[in-house]
Amino acid sequence: MSSLFSNPAKLTPLPFALFLANFLFNVISNASFKFSAQSPNWNGIIAWQVVGNLAGFITVITLTLLLRNTSFNVVYPITAGLSVVGVQVFAAWLLFLNQFRRLSGWGPC
């Protein structure tokens, strides 16, 4: 199995589109679960759970498609890293307006 970055001449837009889709749907999934937790009634809880699980399913599909032509040791660190950054920056900070302390990314400081 060849690596995504082993032959620059073979790079296509598809892997990058899949990484982007994985990133976006991962953020949507996690944000939906937060909205579900904040819902005041069962209708909101269930609706946000459905949205979160559908987005999570698409996230898994994009990961599977990436793994068809790329090594796991390349795909997993990129998708996991993008996921952490996406949830921390886009969902927590921009969407939910969470405040970050100076070293909050380094554990319980």
Image (cartoon, grey):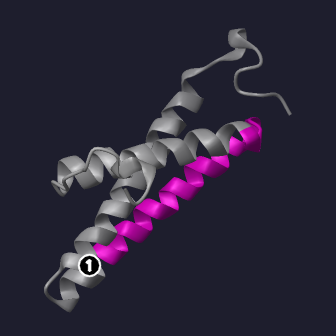
Q: Quadrant of residue 9?
A: top right
Please name the residue shown 55% across and 48% down the image.
Answer: 80
**Which residue is situated farthest in the right direction here?**
1
Residue span colored magenta: 48-73
Residue 21 shown left or right of residue 73 in the figure: left
Q: Nearer the viewer, residue 81 or 62?
A: 81
Numbered label tally: 1
Q: Quadrant of the N terminus?
A: top right
Callout 1: helix, strand or loop?
helix
Please name the residue shown 51% across and 54% down the image.
Answer: 59
Please name the residue shown 43% across and 70% down the image.
Answer: 53
Q: Mark 1: few, some, or many residues within 10 Å (few <14, many ≥20)?
A: some
**Residue 90 pos. (x, y %):** 28, 46
Q: Which residue is mark 1?
A: 37
**Residue 61 covered by magenta stretch:** yes
> The disc labelled 1 sits on which kind of residue?
Ala
**Residue 12 pos. (x, y %):** 60, 20
Please name the residue shown 74% across and 36% down the image.
Answer: 70
Q: Nearer the viewer, residue 81 or 30?
A: 81
Q: Is residue 100 above or below residue 5?
A: below
Q: Quadrant of residue 8?
A: top right
